[in-house]
């Protein structure tokens, strides 16, 4: 299972004993795995920060992966931490947040205190280089109008929550597992169910590092059903998970990146052409200037005041030539404006597809064979049957919610449910899933649930007060020759929603 705050507490306690006072020898990465090589008193240990959404964690590994060409972020990690001494590891409250405190010696400034903060939060997992409370650099950058600014030079802020720390947990027989997760920070739903059944305190459960062979997940004690394997340390249990390094998304990512790059280059070229044409609009002023001088238009001159002329042509011919250049520039600008807008829309399409791909599960990748079929000539479709996409379908309190996670699924939803009794939800002015609701009417509860699903399955997932628009699905029309992710909408209303992760989990788990 994914890390929760209690698991994080025990991991930090273990790492504190294993590697504090060790010096950072080397730092490198392999895909989403970041490795710190430590050395102290003839001992060498490797700490891994695993930012893979399915295997997020921080632990000592005995099997460090090979080095890849360092990225700019890895170079920043090397710059700010290599040679530094790890002095202390802390947890932020009872959240899934590791705070690594380093003392790094500068030849001029002397000892400097720096922090490496690891938020071990599934898809939102992130690494921050922090000095004096300011973000120096981070792995995943994002800027939002409201909420945390995840960009260099911003002040680092922890997630704000009204939950109580898990250290204050007290058993109450009437407190349901869902209520426990809503009240206490760091207690997962699975642990909450165990606590509800047994009446135990989470911090009094003996540590017994366990790996579920069925689920390929680990925890600090045996909370699993089925065959398990026990280890001496939490790091060993985490390190023995089977991690699939071959990224099945790479081929699709390359196609999308290549097209974005190609279209961006073309866009830059057209913008340069437009800038030249804008300059050529001044030719009209030159033609007007010639006719305004009240001189013999049959004269042939090199210059007329500041205007350079073709001396083989008369003033009248020069003026007419300038007007032709002006008209040509004007027509070019009209054409270029249209082409630039088309290119911007095409780039937006691929960027939306890239965002959809980033949120796609392994089972949903087959949809991208259909979406990107024109760009994937080498893919052989062995199954000649029509492709059927598996739409996330949620039934809750008599209402059905359909979540389209990519252009193929969105097209299916718009094609299938353009009729009475269906409503459409989508984040405003951003990429995300189309959520279709089957209901005779909309209540506040339905609106909030559908809006939360649309916000959760979108590029705005990490934000707060996320704007979501909704309307009768008959008011939603596809844009001609564009993927169904891009639509025209009328008569829409808007709501601002915050995501309740527990509610989303309860709606979608095991689907």
Image (cartoon, helix red, strand yellow):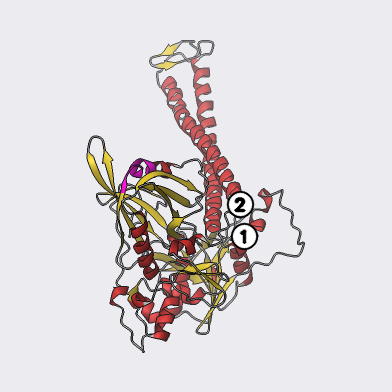
The residue drawn where x is 46% and y is 27% is 284
Depth check, front residue: 80 or 260: 80
Q: Looking at the image, which residue is at 71% across and 52% down?
A: 379
344 versus 393 height, above or below: above
Q: Is residue 295 left or right of residue 203?
A: right
Picture layout, residue 183 above or below residue 124: below
Residue 361, percent from left and from top: 57, 63
- Badge 1 or badge 2: first in the primary sequence: 2
**Residue bearing mark 2:** 252
For the question of whether residue 165 can be seen, the reply is: no
Q: In which quadrant of the rendered view does residue 161 lie?
A: bottom left
Distance from the alpha carbon under mark 1 to that under mark 2: 9 Å
Q: Which residue is mark 1?
A: 365
Residue at 35% over, 62% down = 12
Q: Quadrant of the C terminus?
A: bottom right
Question: Tag 1: Cα neighbours inside 10 Å, few (<14), some, or many (≥20)?
Answer: some
Q: Is residue 312 visible?
A: yes
Q: Quadrant of residue 305?
A: top left
Is residue 300 or residue 432 the one in the foreground? Answer: 432
Residue 84 highlighted magenta (yes or no): yes
Query: At numbered mark 2, what does the secondary structure look like: helix, strand or loop?
Result: helix
Direction from residue 18 to residue 257 in the image, left or right? right
Residue closer to the observer: 287 or 348: 348
Point out residue 404 in the picture as x, y percentages from the top left corner. 56, 66
What crowding class fits label 2: few (fewer than 14 Cα within 10 Å), some (14-19), or many (20 or more)? some
Magenta: main secondary structure: helix
Q: Position of residue 219 (x, y in %)?
A: 46, 70
The residue stretch that appears in magenta: 76-85
Q: Is residue 500 left or right of residue 414?
A: left
User: Do the residues bearing badges 1 and 2 touch, measured as CB atoms within 8 Å?
Assistant: yes
Question: In the figure, 306 relative to 209: above or below?
Answer: above
Say if the magenta span includes residue 342: no
């Amino acid at each position: 299972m994914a890390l929760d705050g209690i698991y994080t507490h025990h991991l930090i306690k273990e790492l504190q004993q294993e590697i504090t006072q060790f010096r950072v020898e080397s730092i490198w990465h392999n895909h989403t795995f970041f490795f710190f090589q430590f050395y102290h008193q003839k001992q060498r240990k490797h700490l891994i920060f695993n930012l893979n959404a399915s295997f997020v964690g921080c632990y000592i590994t005995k099997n460090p992966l090979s080095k890849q060409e360092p990225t700019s972020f890895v170079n920043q990690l090397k710059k700010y931490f290599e040679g530094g001494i790890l002095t202390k590891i802390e947890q932020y409250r009872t959240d899934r947040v590791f705070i690594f405190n380093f003392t790094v010696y500068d030849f001029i400034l002397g000892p400097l205190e720096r922090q490496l903060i690891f938020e071990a939060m599934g898809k939102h997992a992130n690494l921050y280089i922090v000095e004096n409370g300011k973000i120096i650099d981070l792995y995943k950058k994002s800027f939002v109008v409201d909420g945390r600014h995840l960009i260099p030079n911003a002040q680092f802020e922890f997630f704000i929550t009204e939950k109580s720390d898990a250290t204050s947990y007290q058993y109450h027989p009437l407190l349901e597992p869902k209520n426990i997760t809503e009240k206490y920070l760091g207690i997962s739903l699975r642990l909450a169910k165990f606590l509800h059944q047994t009446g135990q305190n989470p911090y009094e459960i003996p540590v017994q590092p366990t790996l579920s062979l069925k689920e390929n997940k680990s925890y600090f004690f045996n909370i699993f059903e089925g065959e398990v394997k026990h280890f001496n340390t939490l790091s060993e249990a985490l390190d023995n998970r089977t991690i699939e390094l071959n990224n099945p998304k790479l081929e699709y990512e390359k196609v999308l990146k290549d097209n974005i790059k190609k279209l961006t280059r073309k866009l830059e070229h057209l913008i340069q052409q437009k800038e030249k044409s804008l300059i050529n609009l001044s030719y009209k002023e030159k033609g007007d200037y010639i006719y305004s001088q009240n001189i013999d238009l049959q004269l042939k001159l090199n210059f007329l005041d500041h205007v350079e002329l073709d001396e083989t042509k008369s003033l009248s011919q020069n003026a007419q030539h300038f007007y032709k250049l002006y008209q040509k520039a004007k027509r070019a600008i009209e054409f270029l404006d249209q082409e630039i807008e088309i290119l911007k829309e095409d780039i937006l399409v691929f960027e939306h597809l890239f965002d959809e791909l980033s949120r796609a599960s392994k089972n949903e990748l087959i949809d991208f064979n259909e979406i990107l079929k024109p760009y994937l000539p080498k893919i052989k479709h062995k199954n000649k049957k029509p492709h059927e996409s598996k739409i996330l379908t949620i039934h809750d309190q008599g209402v059905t919610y359909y979540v389209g996670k990519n252009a193929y699924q969105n097209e299916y939803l718009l094609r299938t449910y353009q009729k009475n009794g269906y409503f459409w939800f989508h984040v405003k002015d951003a990429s995300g899933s189309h959520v279709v609701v089957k209901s005779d009417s909309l209540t506040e509860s339905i609106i909030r649930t559908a809006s939360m699903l649309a916000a959760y399955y979108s590029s705005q997932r990490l934000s707060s007060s996320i704007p979501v628009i909704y309307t009768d699905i008959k008011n939603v029309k596809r844009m001609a020759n564009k993927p169904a992710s891009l639509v025209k909408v009328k008569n829409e209303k808007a709501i601002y929603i915050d995501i309740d992760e527990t509610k989303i989990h309860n709606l979608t788990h095991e689907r």
